[in-house]
């Protein structure tokens, strides 16, 4: 047997307090009677009064309260096997891990802010399968489509600017990797790709890749991470010393958000572009307003053990006690 509402165990204090009140009241009543007459004379002066029946009334009322508390706890025992269908949407998240994502115009950095937003996204998921793609100059599936959200978060935690050795920001590769992964492990129309990137120094032709993805019923949503004013890219060496990233000519590199590119990608696939702000990253808005409203499909079905609710038994006994209590007299039968 198990109880569902374990957070309501504190309600056990109610019958305990009621028992203390009854004991106190019974003793006070006894003292008042003893002030009226001595203990030997009481039975003769109050021949109809029965302390045993009074205790029985108290016990029945206490039982009603205790049984009601147990019913509120929702006891369960026994089980039946039921077929449970898991329905949801397949969604890949592609995260830019290029050096420009180390820029701190979004605190603590563009990449770290994106990782925090993904942790918040997992709390919104409603049984959907989610996968993770890391990309820079090339792309790699960090986590395949799964409903194991703890495993997905472990993959998110491992993301860093060294996850992809090849430098650059090739969003086309990320889209192509998502297309291949969807084709391998996902069928149907309920597919979405979310790209988190600053869109800077892009390579390839991501707009054409987005058009091809749209033909395969993959909707792309883009989140712009960073500011259009930009900031210098801060990197750390093996000893933890911080410095600014420089180009091949020794000049410091300033990274800026490329909104036009990300907007074009979203437009080509009938998706949506959102610019991340310090107060709201935008992932929750994309999921709740767009992805969650997509038609869900059956991801898998399984036979699961369903415990049977048994709260009705203590509740019925509690009602029976409340029904009986008024008929129990505290007077003896003559």
Image: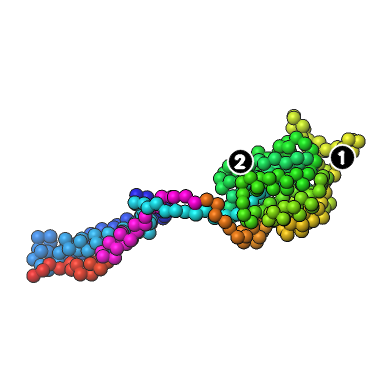
Pointer 2: residues within 10 angstroms few (<14), some, or many (20+)? few
Residue plotted at (65% across, 48% down): 182
Q: Helix, strand or loop at disc 2?
A: helix
Residue 211, given in percent of the width and then of the height, sits at: 76, 54
In the figure, is residue 41 to the left or right of 7? Answer: left
Q: CA distance from mark 2 to mark 1?
A: 33 Å
Pointer 1: residues within 10 angstroms few (<14), some, or many (20+)? some
Query: Is residue 225 placed above or below 164 in the rendered structure?
Result: below
| Total numbered circles | 2
State the residue position of label 2.
Answer: 154
In the figure, is residue 194 to the left or right of 151? Answer: right
State the residue position of label 1.
Answer: 252
In the figure, is residue 260 to the left or right of 187? Answer: right
User: Considering the image in quadrants, where does the C terminus appear?
Assistant: bottom left
Viewer-nearest of discs 2 and 1: 2
Residue 314, given in percent of the width and then of the height, sits at: 31, 59
Residue 196, given in percent of the width and then of the height, sits at: 72, 49
């Amino acid at each position: 047997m198990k109880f569902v509402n374990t957070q309501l165990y504190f309600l056990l204090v109610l019958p305990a307090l009621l028992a203390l009140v009854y004991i106190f009241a019974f003793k006070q009543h006894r003292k008042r009677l003893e002030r009226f007459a001595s203990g030997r004379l009481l039975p003769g002066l109050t021949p109809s009064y029965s302390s045993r029946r009074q205790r029985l009334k108290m016990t029945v009322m206490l039982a009603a309260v205790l049984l009601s508390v147990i019913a509120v706890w929702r006891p369960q025992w026994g089980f039946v096997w039921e077929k449970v269908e898991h329905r949801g949407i397949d969604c890949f998240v592609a995260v830019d891990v290029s050096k420009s994502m180390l820029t701190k115009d979004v605190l603590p950095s563009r990449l770290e802010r994106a990782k925090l937003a993904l942790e918040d996204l997992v709390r919104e998921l409603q049984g959907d399968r989610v996968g993770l793609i890391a990309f820079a100059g090339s792309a790699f599936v960090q986590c395949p489509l799964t409903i194991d959200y703890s495993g997905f978060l472990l993959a998110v935690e491992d993301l860093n600017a060294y996850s992809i050795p090849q430098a650059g920001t090739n969003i086309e590769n990320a889209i192509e990797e998502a297309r291949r992964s969807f084709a391998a492990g996902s069928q149907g129309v309920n597919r979405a790709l979310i790209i988190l990137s600053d869109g800077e120094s892009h390579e390839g032709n991501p707009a054409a890749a987005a058009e091809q993805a749209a033909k395969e019923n993959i909707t792309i949503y883009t989140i712009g991470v960073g500011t259009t004013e930009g900031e210098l890219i801060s990197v750390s060496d093996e000893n933890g010393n911080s410095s600014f990233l420089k180009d091949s000519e020794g000049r410091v590199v300033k990274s800026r958000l490329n909104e036009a590119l990300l907007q074009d990608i979203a437009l080509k696939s009938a998706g949506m572009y959102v610019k991340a702000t310090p107060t709201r990253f935008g992932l929750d808005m994309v999921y709740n307003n767009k992805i969650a409203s997509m038609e869900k499909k059956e991801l898998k079905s399984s036979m699961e053990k369903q415990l049977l609710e048994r709260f009705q038994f203590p509740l019925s006994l509690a009602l029976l006690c409340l029904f009986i209590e008024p008929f129990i007299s505290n007077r003896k039968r003559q």
